[in-house]
Amino acid sequence: MEETQRGTHLVSLPLPEKLRCMKAKDDNVFHTLSFQAPKIRLLRSLVIEERHKMQVLDFAVFPKPEFDLPIFCANFFSSGQLNIIVLDLNPLHDVITQMVYKEKYYKKLLPLGEKYCELLPWGGKLTGESIRFFSPIVIWTKFTSSQSKHDILYSAFQDYYKAWLELMDQATEETDALQILHNCEAQHKYLTWRAEKDPGYPLLKKLFGDNLAKEITRSFLFDGVASLGDKSFLDYFPGYECEDGTINKKRTVVGKSFETRPWNTTGDFIGYEFG
Ligand code: BLA
């Protein structure tokens, strides 16, 4: 937060009392933070303090629709032994087919991705649909706890966040109404995906029950899902529609894919070959 404050003016966003500091059924304590800034629609952080060995950091920054900046995404889950990590500047627009967007934000960052892809190697197969939300520099990894791994991860987190802050600093405001709408819809699609299919949800449900978990997801973690656009989950992801018109409860309908890193060192997507 100090690093962020150095470059921009954060203004605290009010949260309902019950989402401020929460105690879960098994005594885990949750801490929530929520801010906005001139170029930031929502910066929010959820920390689950270490207890019964489990520990979580879910930190994300969503730009205002006037900026086509990537979405900063740090999702660290630790069960004590096992750590499940996603760290990325999630692209707002498709970087598999849209070369202009990819070049604009990721070309300069490829060396950063390369620095960490050996230290924090690819975590194996994942929900196939998720790959479209990841960038060529994504860190998707799993490891057993050790001080050295945690140090590397912390250093990656600092480097990736500084890189994002620098992008924010340089970003200029879009004035074209159509482009702003396009950015808005892209962010809404992202929020809609995560609000429905985030892997953390089953755990939140176990800790807080269905109703509060839903509120945490929709009004805090992925706030904007109800206000940035009108389209539904099935409008964006029709493949999940069941015969009776409901949303398939499975996280993936295409299956788990991408055993190895589907991006090469020059940032090209090579996942079609084995996706
Ligand atoms: C697992 N979390 C995962 C996995 C991914 C992510 C890819 C592997 C399982 C899979 O392929 O679905 C993360 N997936 C993401 C992210 C995006 C995405 C960041 O599509 C963004 C577009 N994780 C959390 C929080 C908790 C959490 C808050 O961020 C718990 C409160 C837990 N993540 C968690 C757990 C697993 C997991 C328990 C392993 C369980 C599983 O694989 O279902």
Image (cartoon, rainbow, N blue to C red):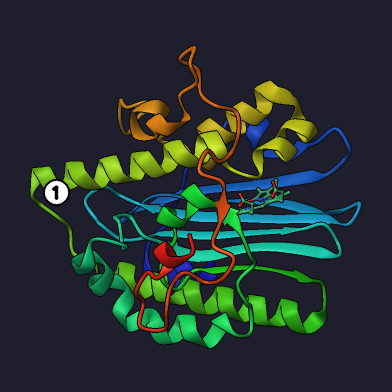
Q: Quadrant of residue 120?
A: bottom right
Residue 187 seen in render: yes
Residue beneath disc 1:
179
Nearest the eye: 50 or 54: 54
Can see residue 15?
Answer: no
Q: Is residue 16 above or below residue 21?
A: above
* Outermost residue toward the right in this view: 52
Tell me residue 116's x, y (percent): 56, 83
**Quick one: 97 or 112, which is closer to the camera?**
97
Question: Quadrant of the rendered structure where residue 190 is?
Answer: top left
Q: Position of residue 36 (x, y in %)?
A: 41, 49
| Residue at 14% over, 55% down | 174
Mark 1 element type: helix
Q: Report whether 264 appears left or right of 115.
A: left
Spot occupied by residue 136 in the image (x, y as percentages of width and height): 41, 71
Q: Is residue 60 above or below residue 194?
A: below
Between residue 253 and residue 5, name the one nearer to us. 253
Q: Which residue lies at the image location 38% right of the left edge and 30% below the top edge?
A: 238
Residue at the spot 30% in from the left edge and 30% down from the top edge: 229
- Relative placement, left or right, of 25 versus 85 is right
Q: For this view, does 161 lie left or right of residue 103?
A: right
Residue that sits furthest to the top in the current view: 244
Local packing at callout 1 (Cα closer than 10 Å; few below 14, some 14-19, many 20+) is some
- Residue 270, x across and y down, in percent: 40, 70
Does residue 34 lie above or below 82 as drawn?
above
- Residue that lies at the very extreme toward the front in this rendered image: 273
Q: Amino acid at mark 1?
A: Gln
